[in-house]
Amino acid sequence: MRSTVPVLFCLAASAVVPTGGGAQEALPLISVEVDLGAYGLAGPSEVRRGRVSVAYAPEGIRLGMYYLREGSIPPRVTYPDPPPMPVSSTLDRVETRQTALWVWNTEELIRDLAEREVFLDFLEARGITRAFLYLAAAEGTSPSAGYIPFSSEEIGPLVAEMRARGTLAYALDGDRDYVLPQNHAGVYRTVERLVEHNRAVPEEQRFHGVRYDIEPYLAQGFQGPSRSLLLDGYVELIAGVSRIARVGGLAVAVDIPFWFDAPDEETGVYMEAVYQGRRARVLEHLMSLVDDIAIMDYRTIAEGADGALAHALHELEMGEAMGVDVFVGVETTRLVDEDLHTFFGPIREGLPPHGDLRWVVLEEGQDSRTRVWVVDSEEALLELRERTVGARFLRHWPAGRPIRVAADKQSFHNLGRERMERVTDTIVRHLIGAPAFAGLAFHDYRGLRELLSRK
């Protein structure tokens, strides 16, 4: 997807309505409330175009807002396909490849000894050498503004048992709002506690590194005037984490999407940030601050312009040049199909004239809230008329032909073990000779365990 630039991010808001239907059936009336200020808009009358997501989750259909814009739609930016990744001839480097795993259910592993033993057996059986272990708060405490009050007494023994099975642990945390300045101090405090932990406990209980999975593109305002500030804050935060962690001998790592090095699909501008007075691409700044990255390279094919190999190529080249190890991420958890609708065109006041098409409707209600609706049936349109009685502002657009984002394109969850192993074997066969290739990283423990358990 590098050639068309990512669209799978920035759900500024979402709403869920229950449904028993699938993607091919008429939608129930769905809506989501949005903050126009996050998109740099003073009011609903300024909206000229946008993009919404209709996601078909088992618990109900979700409506998400990707962006709203004023002004006409710009020419679409196109990019050449990346060059093919050659097959490596250096197959004797297998022993240098690690296999990594994201682990989010740390609290369960700390408190349930039977589940912990299953987990440890799994690590050993699968040859997992690196685990990205979510840093769970101590019993009776809660995280606050970036600070995770973990207990060395609780988590240290788990880290030691993992090490005994051949697995080194990274302390994993992350939240989109960590990029905000008010949360930096809490994040730094967490890293300082990790340094203290490693100094106070026996060697076998020490973390190998600290890892942040932050996803700043999900923060409110990223699709509006706050993007530069959010990216600047992200790089500044990782720089601070790096300074503190290195004093304590901790490796520093981040998780990024594969499209982080791609230009914006509308403007063609790369994501950049200013750090220490220097403007550069965000990925370049990050590579200068960390020891390794994991690419969320979530594709279920290896080859081709939209395959995992092509999407990892630039990060591997940059990693080699900058001395940074690169894990290639593989998704195994359950995802859902999405339809992306981009709407634009002439202004149409009021409600849609009929429900034979799918429409996007923008409403400003009596209480000044701004709400986006999607409607595609006469029944839903009738309900919308009743709900918007007295609305001060209504405008509609045809939803446009959807772009389908299929779950099976991103995750092996529904495709099974044989398909996953065939594709990941191809990835390793191509990349094993690449100096920066650290190995595969599977997301996540629960998803991989479930997938492998199915016949």
Image: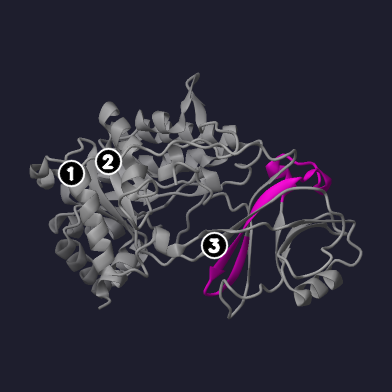
Residue name at image x 24 percent, y 36 percent: 436
Q: Which residue is mark 2?
A: 85
Tag in front: 2 or 1: 2
Q: Which residue is at the far top?
A: 277
Examine the image and state in which quarter residue 125 appears.
bottom left
- Front residue of 137 and 25: 25
Q: Give the residues drawn in magenta, as a range.
A: 35-63
- SS category of the residue bearing label 3: strand
Badge 1 local density, few (<14 within 10 Å), some, or many (20+)? Answer: many
- The quarter of the picture where the C terminus appears is bottom left
Residue 201 visible in the snapshot: no
Relative horizontal placement of residue 297, taking residue 383 as reference (left or right): left
Relative horizontal placement of residue 334, taking residue 379 as reference (left or right): left
Q: Could you tell which of marks 1 and 3 lies nearer the N-terminus?
A: 3
- Front residue of 107 and 176: 176
Q: CA distance from mark 1 to mark 3?
A: 34 Å
The disc labelled 3 sits on which kind of residue? Answer: Glu
Q: How many marks?
A: 3
Q: Which residue is mark 1?
A: 432
The label on residue 338 is 3
Q: CA distance from mark 2 to mark 1?
A: 12 Å
- SS category of the residue bearing label 2: loop
